[in-house]
Image (spheres, rainbow, N blue to C red):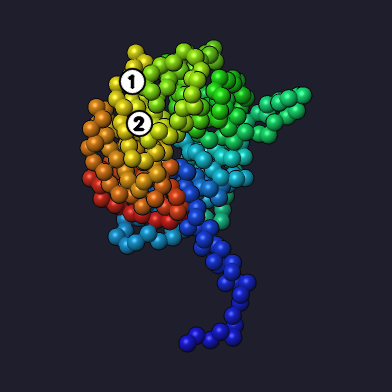
Amino acid sequence: MEDCRNWNEKEYRASIVAERDVHSRTIFAAAFVPATASAVPEHVATASSNGSVALYPVQPSVSSPGIAKPSLIVGKHDGPAYGLLSYGEDHNALLLSCGDDGRIQGWQWKDIHAALGCETTSGRKLQPTLDFRNPQQRGPFSALCPIPETNALAANSRTGCLFAAAGDGCAYAWDMETGKNTMVFQGHSDYLHCIASRPSHNQIITGSEDGTARIWDCRSGECVAALDPWNAVKISKKPMAKLPWISCLSLDASDNWLVCGNGGHCVTLWSLPGLDCVTRICMRATPQAVTIANDQILTVGTQPILSRWSFGGTLLSQAVCAPLSAFSVSVHPSGLTAVAGYGGLVDIISEFGSHLCTFCCG
């Protein structure tokens, strides 16, 4: 029996709250850190519901998921951090993040690698090299509306533009050199969940709660096409009925194939040159993140399963992943896949379905 004379109820309560906070945390985005020397990723960057943007080591392990300490806390948002994006190349490359506070922050990768090389990085935060904030729109009687949250990011490095999908139903374009907001894309009737850049055509594609995916011309700011992924058709006017929301979308490397996931438990694949839906995949769960890699469609969602599909809709493989509900899937050139989501869990899975490591972000 332990000695309870030094019992500290206040410390005990604080430890219980801290433990619950860790296990109820959600990782909304995870991305592999570009390696400086090794072809195998050494760290993964995360955007968390507690607002932190942090780097965790990728350490092979066969033990059950444990609470991992971050190698570096890059920064923090005032509210949940929703998205991550790597922008640029070489010494000018940036890690960008967005969040519920409407801010877009960026740090240079060279500064991050330098901080990782320091012996003492605990509790250290880097100063962002850029810090954008969504503009406030005016509502009725010219009253200023709250600053909308930023839910996702995309970029066109050819034109030096950054694009943000916001909670007011608009997408915003930023000039990376001047830091100025250069264009507002308006047309959705509800907030935006996701965004993708199509550099080869100087376009962006947005997915919204209103159930449509829209293609925008970045030169004019006009919507050039609206897609209804639920019914797998191109539309010319606002739908009469409420459509399942667009939860996620992604483009392949050629910019010719678009994959959309929606709240109707389905994923659709579109051939963009003809704006034709060529494949419709029905699923048991809502897809919450999709990507295209090696001519395969990878999906994760409200079930703890990573699925790989052919462009024809054939299920190629499935692997059980640690998060019960996953919000992010990222593929490394080495073939490793990072799946992240509820419980603060990040699962690193090989292309053969084995688990390299699984950890809970502490």
Place of residue 321 in the rendered image (x, y in percent of width and height, measured from the top left): 33, 49
Asked if disc 2 and disc 1 are in contact, CB closer than 8 Å, the reply is no
Image mark for residue 277: 1
Identify the image quadrant of residue 171.
Answer: top right
Separation (CA) of disc 2 from disc 1:
11 Å
Q: Residues within 10 Å of mark 1 (few under 14, many from 20)?
A: many
Query: Which amino acid does the dot numbered 2 rest on?
Result: Val
Identify the image quadrant of residue 318.
Answer: top left
Kindly identify which residue carries mark 2: 267
Place of residue 139 in the rendered image (x, y in percent of width and height, measured from the top left): 71, 26
Residue 115 shows in the view: no
- Helix, strand, or loop for circle 2? strand
- Helix, strand, or loop for circle 1? strand
Q: Residues within 10 Å of mark 2 (few under 14, many from 20)?
A: many
Extreme residue toward the front, this view: 241
- Residue 233 is left or right of residue 187, and the answer is left
Residue at 75% x, 28% y is: 143
